[in-house]
Amino acid sequence: MKRLLVIVWVSGISCWLAAPCAAAPAYGTRLPAKRHLVVGGQTHAVLNRDLEDARGEMSGLQHFLLLSFGITDWLSLDLKGGAGDIEQDPDNGNKVQYPAYVGGGYGFRARLYDEEKIKAVFGFQHISIHPYSVFIGNTKNKAVLDDWQFSLLGSYDLKWFTPYLGAKWSRMDYIHWEEDFRKRKQSDPDKSAGLVVGMDIPFGQRMWLNAEGQFLDSQAVAVSVNYQF
């Protein structure tokens, strides 16, 4: 009961921090041990995300340094920083490409179940990408990608690798400025529920490779190499 109350409290704080910012990688079910730090490098490619009201689609490539800290054996704080770009393809108009610049994110994961080889993890993740502005004609165009999600994952340890499967609810917004005029374009609300499929492949006791794909709400893949100190 105490663990559930902590999860609900952290979820509420995370929603408050993210709003009105939301498919970020779900990281998998391997959490850092209590008071241990995991450092990793991650590449996340959003291949396609549909926007609301037939406003086209969005994609992007992101690279991050990952930091995860074990607050307890069942709760971790996840931080990331790096860079990413945005490509926005409207239904009526020309594709706009924003060159890569700074990005970052935060979140948490809470282990709900851990018995023998089976684990279940609930997570919240948020990413914000701020690429370089571009000029279309004489008009300055600026964009921000705001990406967040809640996920519930289950995994089974097969010794040589640990596959996991889960569901998520996500939202990815395209925030666009033409000079000083700002407009937020949300992702398609009919495509908010998604599927997560991934695996962790260990290399010894402290290092592992994480690979993940996301479907239905978006088409995205993420790969990271991680090491626990």
Image (tube, rainbow, N blue to C red):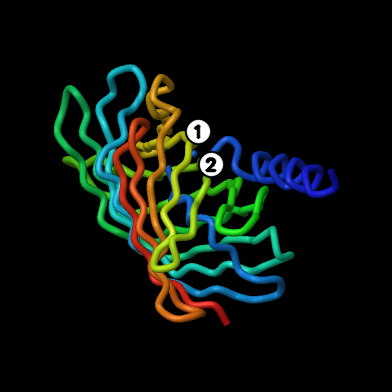
Q: Residue at x 68, y 40 (%)?
A: 16
Instruction: Indicate the position of residue 142 as horizontal and vertical percent values.
Output: 34, 45
- CA distance separating discs 2 and 1: 7 Å
* Number of residues whose C-alpha sits closer than 10 Å to that of mark 2, classed few (under 14), some (14–19) or many (20 or more): many
The one of 5 and 201 positioned closer to us in this rendering: 201
Instruction: Indicate the position of residue 163 as horizontal and vertical percent values.
Output: 41, 54
Instruction: Indicate the position of residue 144 as horizontal and vertical percent values.
Output: 40, 45
The one of 82 and 139 positioned closer to us in this rendering: 82
Q: Residue at x 58, y 67 (%)?
A: 68
Q: Amino acid at mark 1?
A: Trp
Q: Residue at x 52, y 46 (%)?
A: 154
Secondary element type, mark 1: strand
Instruction: Compare marks 2 and 1 and give the one earlier in the sequence.
Output: 2
* Number of residues whose C-alpha sits closer than 10 Å to that of mark 1, classed few (under 14), some (14–19) or many (20 or more): some
Where's the N terminus, which quadrant?
Answer: top right
Where's the C terminus, which quadrant?
Answer: bottom right
Question: Which image quadrant is residue 56 in?
Answer: top left
Instruction: Indicate the position of residue 34 as horizontal and vertical percent values.
Output: 71, 71
Residue 218, placed above or below residue 65: above
Residue 179, placed above or below residue 224: above
Left or right of 207 in this view: 132 = left
Secondary element type, mark 2: strand
Q: Amino acid at mark 2?
A: Ser
The one of 20 and 142 positioned closer to us in this rendering: 20
Determine which of the numbered discs, if any, sits on residue 151 in the image.
Answer: 2
Q: Residue at x 50, y 51 (%)?
A: 155
Q: Pointer 2 and pointer 1: residues touching (CB < 8 Å)?
A: yes
Determine which of the numbered discs, if any, sits on residue 216 in the image.
Answer: none
* Residue 132 seen in this snapshot: no
Left or right of 134 in this view: 202 = right
* Residue 68 seen in this snapshot: yes
Tell me the residue that label 1 is attached to.
169
